[in-house]
Amino acid sequence: MDALRTESYRRGMTNEKLAPVILFQKAFIDNIRRNGRLDEIELIAQFKILGFAATRSPRFLFKDASLGLKLQAREKLHLRGEKVRDRGVVRRIFDRCQNGSA
Amino acid sequence: MNLGYYPGCALHGSSDDYEQSLRACFSALGVELNELDEWICCGATAAHSLNPKLSIALPARNLALASQSGFQEMLAPCSMCSMQLMKAQRLMSKDTALAKEMARIVEGKPDGTRVLNLIQAFELVGLDAIKAAVKSPLQDLEVACYYGCLLTRPPEIVEFDDCEQPESMERIVAALGAKPVAWNYKTECCGAGMTMSSEETVLELSHKILVDAAEHGAKTIVVACPMCNVNLDMKQVAIEARYGTKHGMPIYYLSDLVGLALGLTPQQLGLNRHFVQGKV
């Protein structure tokens, strides 16, 4: 299933209905490339902005806004995400896998 | 006992109540968790959907760091992380050319560490040792043990328990004095990482899990994965609104139940940080 999913993404033949899922996954990968670890706030911001740019839907933009307050009340919202110290090695791993560079 | 520890992004993010629970619980069992220095994300669903090589390289980097750290065993309490680490390990063990390529890509040799999911970590401590440490038995609490997709699958990768009818979590909760129920949805998917990108999928799948657990007499569901917890606990109010029903089903991490039975307080385990509050 992974092989089919990867191939459909590579050929640009993904299901329109799943566009938000692909968008989320791309934002996720970009985030890891930058930080080494997931920065949840940054990921959500990027996902929402890209999604809004694609759909022009205010509902998409604000749908999960109340969740932030609920997470904050449980001390689950971390405004500053973690980054690894050696982000250079993370970028090199990504370059080698995405571009085939040495 | 010392145990290597790969938290993964969720346990250092919005699921840090899970890490609070784990640390309290393992400390009470005399196990010190040594966090892997400079660990990076395992790539999760995004990497294996978009770039197969990256989905091996990211876990392989962590395996190389674990090996350099001299970890014999390493707990990965998120079932996505543990599966991804095990998968990279399995693929490299079968393909020496891939192992060599990965060593070059990740700038280290990824071998020598056994990856454990949460249930396996408790098994390493030992059921007898856990049973002997119980101070507050769970008094026949009816529990649905939920494994989700990734703790037992793909079976050729994780090589853990029966992939369709697992029983390992039931043995642990029974050792605590709880009463595991027989039910149908223990290895069904909750929607995993689609919480935000495909909410409707998560609501539908998780609703079915909550309904089946209740129909089989469960008073609570126990999980061993942060994503399962998010979808069943955090999204429960949205599920109730979507389906016009009231579940009110508390969701516990396995370490919560072990910790409570060991005599730890709900606050020590972070239970006050869950969305659906329950009483054990």
Image (spheres, grey):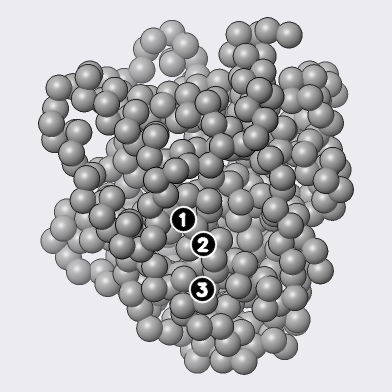
Q: Secondary structure at mark 3?
A: helix
Q: Nearer the viewer, residue B155 or A87?
A: A87
Q: In the picture, which quadrant includes the C terminus of chain A?
A: top right
Is residue B65 among the parts visible in the rendering?
Answer: yes
Q: Which mark is residue B269?
A: 3
Mark 1 → mark 3, Cα distance in angstroms:
13 Å
The percent position of residue A45, horizontal first and vertical second, equals 32, 33
Amino acid type of the residue tagged 2 in the rendering = Tyr
Q: Which mark is residue B15?
A: 1
The percent position of residue A44, horizontal first and vertical second, equals 34, 36
Tell me: residue B59, above or below residue B271. Answer: above
From the image, tell me which residue sits under label 2: B18
Find out whether the residues at labels 1 and 2 contact each other: C-beta distance under 8 Å.
yes
Is tag 1's residue or tag 3's residue first in the polypeptide sequence? 1
Q: Secondary structure at mark 1?
A: loop
Q: Nearer the viewer, residue A75 or B270?
A: A75
